[in-house]
Image (cartoon, grey):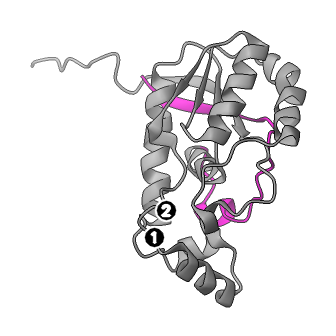
Amino acid sequence: MALLKTDSRKNKKKRVKVIFVRHGSVGLVNIYKDCSDPHLTRDGLLQVMAIIEKVGRYKPTIIVASSMNRTAETATTLSAGLNVPWTKKESIASLDTSGVNVAELLAAVEASGMTWQWYWYEKGWPGLESCRDYVSKTAQAILEILKTADGPVVLVGHSETYLALLSLVGIPLTTALSVNVPNAKPLVFDIAVDV
């Protein structure tokens, strides 16, 4: 009788602390209506500065952010205050609405009485990936980031990024869509990652 050899590396998990921070405030701008990539306002910058000490308590080893102005500026501010490096990852980016007739879409969303997130989930956006596809793709990208982590990770993203993160802790998408993610407030998760 032959013995089966098993790879001892399979099915091993590590736990990674993730400190999620949605970017600081960009003010009263409708990102989807004007398709802009706004910068943090002065208040947004002050919001981020106000959380540096709280985020530092988790002793992060890296800060990862999407490349949008608002997340990059949030990450840069945290990085300087914590003396922790940061890196851009396109894989956790906000929705790309460049191929969408945003004015037409917003009119449909407004007529429906739904939030844009619920409209995206229920009806989809012509020219844009589905909510489920975005969440699945971004959750996988987050796991790839965490696989290489050697300590707590600050993840600076968007409300859509938060949906993907919640899926990794088993929160159903329909529940996650009802959560209002505040700007520049650290939210801490412990994520199991295959190694």
Which residue is denoted by mark 1 in the rendering? 100
Residue occupying image coordinates x 79% and y 35%: 186
Residue 53 position, x and y percent, is 87, 19
- Labelled pair 2, 1 in contact (Cβ < 8 Å): yes
Q: Residue at x 72, y 9 (%)?
A: 83
Q: Is residue 68 above or below residue 151?
A: below
- The crowding category of the residue bearing disc 1, from other C-alpha atoms within 10 Å (few below 14, some 14 to 19, many at least 20), is some
Q: Dot 2: few (<14), some (14–19), or many (≥20) neighbours within 10 Å?
A: some
Q: From the viewer's perspective, is 80 left or right of 126?
A: right
Q: Along the horizontal axis of the image, is 166 left or right of 100?
A: right
Q: Looking at the image, is 36 positioned above or below residue 10?
A: below
The answer to whether residue 1 is above or below residue 22 is above
- Residue named by callout 2: 97
Q: Which portion, as a residue range, is magenta?
A: 169-195
Q: Residue at x 18, y 21 (%)?
A: 4
Quadrant showing the N terminus: top left
> In terms of image quadrants, where is residue 150?
top right
Q: Residue furthest top?
A: 83
Q: Is residue 91 covered in magenta?
A: no
Q: Nearer the viewer, residue 75 or 1?
A: 75
Q: Is residue 57 left or right of residue 4?
A: right
Q: Position of residue 48 (x, y in %)?
A: 82, 32
Residue 121: image x %, image y %? 55, 71
Q: Residue at x 90, y 29 (%)?
A: 50
Name the amino acid, label 2. Answer: Thr
Q: Position of residue 116 (x, y in %)?
A: 64, 72
Q: Secondary structure at mark 1?
A: loop
